Image (tube, rainbow, N blue to C red):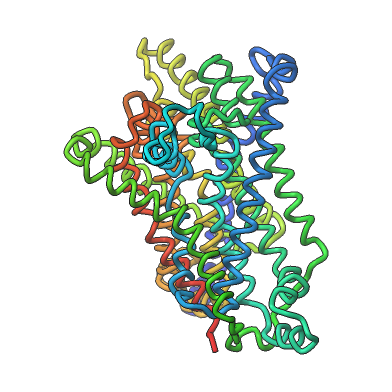
Amino acid sequence: MTEAASSGETGLGQPLLAKRTSKRWLISAALTTAIVALPVVSVLFLALFPDENIWPHLLDTTLPRYLITTFKLMLGVAAITLVIGLATAWAVTMCEFPGRRFFEWAMLLPFAVPAYVIAYVYTSLLDYAGPVQKALREIFGWESARDYWFPEIRSLEGATLMIGLVLYPYVYLLARAAFLEQSPSLFAVSRSLGHSAISTFFRVVLPIARPAIAVGLSLVLMETLNDFGTVDFFAVQTLTAGLFDTWMNLGNLGGAAQIATTMLVFVVILVTLERYSRRRQQQFAARDNRDPIRRFTLTRPRQLICIAVCILPVTLGFVVPAITLGQYAWEYFDESWNSEFIRNTLNSLFLSGTAALTTLLIGVTLAYSRRLHDTRGMQIMMRLSSLGYAMPGAVLAVGVIIPLAGFDNWLDGLMRDTFNISTGLLLSGSAFALVFAYTVRFLAVSAGSVESALQKITPSMDMASRSMGHSPGSTLLRVHLPMLRGTLITAALVVFVDCMKELPATLILRPFNFETLATYVYQFASDEKLAHSALPALIIVLAGIIPIILMSRSISNTRSIA
């Protein structure tokens, strides 16, 4: 009788314990979401209640110029990335030509080059004192700039081209994935009705791939809005440049928050338009969407056109910058390789590694919490936790510094009054602020990857583990994490590289006398010393190649080729 009672008590206790443990995951997810959303709330609060309201002044003077310039920049970058991304994605997916397999992954190489790095490279090559104009003057006997016309690289048009050359892989990546998922029967029917390859592209392929293209384009525009290094170097007055000027030069944090709120409005509009563009589109996988793709056989002239279409963006977006940086790094290696470079490299590795690990832990927590509680509220929390990825780095920096500085000031005042001790800037003046900003900004990368991978694991695995007495946490450690190892490594690498390249938030939040490779490159380039910034810039570029290869392989493996 005692054994039976004990057995019954254990049977009732296990579900109760599992329920309590499951609630802990839900509470952890809610707290994490609140912390991640804190920067957005902080920006909005300070914009509405600034210490000194300069909004009327901004509205009458600089804000219209910032808005118009930003709109022109985004429109130009969108056009460039759409043309390059769609043309190259269609060519490598549906056309057979020499070098196609190479270009499948090579088209992603410009992804590894930050926009500000490519801007520095082409300025050194195309400026008046650069080798290109020098050669032209020697060949044609020109003596000064008045004797000839040459396009100005440091301009809005120059910034548009530089940013477009490194951001088109967003459109290429998603468009190619969408093309690979389409049914071969659609192409066969279109061709049987007499449509050419170009006509099939515009009438059949493009409308079906529109949702994926819209997502890629929205990411391009968000990254364009986030850019600071390029627009600052080219003296293009965008909203991001205006935010830095208002905060750093005018010393008005409230005005910076108001400009940041304007940038958030841009982000909301972009996200809304992206969702609106696919509101009525509901697509289902065709039965033959895994059948081998039969590529179009092209004539020799058309093959040469495909090669030219693919080789031009790769050459301009990666080969030329890589060769230029490599040459400068080799020539100035003895000067560049010093204690300062090593220290800054270690700073970047530490910050990027810490942020990658943090985002991975939080991403697993959020994704697994949703698996345990797949409710409407949990879905909303997942979306809120992804807000940081849509926020420009400068906006995020404003949102991070406000609560951290407020906490530091409160703690310092408390310690002064109680113990007559000054604690200083514990959070806002340390590397913690940078790691926090990186985590908020790139959390969506890890959380989205883990959530997508978890959805592919059958729920029966959880049931079997729970029937053996394992808690949700034990199930995660023993069952899910081993199965997610590849996804976790890939997500960590992507976040790591993104953190290595991040510039706007790093410039604002870095502690005194603390530099990363990105800010190190920015400082040298600002002083017109590109050659001395070549080695750290090359390290950033090389670090970005590994995730590119992984992404290309994952896409190529989704579909066989006839």
The answer to whether residue 435 shows anywhere in this view is no
Q: Which residue is most to the front?
A: 141
Q: Position of residue 307 (x, y in %)?
A: 51, 69
Q: Position of residue 110 (x, y in %)?
A: 46, 55
Quadrant housing residue 285: bottom right
Q: Position of residue 24 (x, y in %)?
A: 54, 54
Relative to 375, is 286 above or below?
below
Looking at the image, residue 356 sits to the left or right of residue 71; the answer is left
Decide which of 1, 87 is in the foreground and name it.
87
Q: Position of residue 349 (x, y in %)?
A: 31, 45
State which quarter of the image contains the C terminus: bottom right
Looking at the image, residue 191 sits to the left or right of residue 362; the answer is right
Quadrant housing residue 222: top right
Question: Residue at (54%, 28%) from the top-left corner?
Answer: 235
Decide which of 14, 501 is in the foreground and name it.
501
Quadrant housing residue 499: top left
Question: Residue at (37%, 19%) from the top-left corner?
Answer: 423
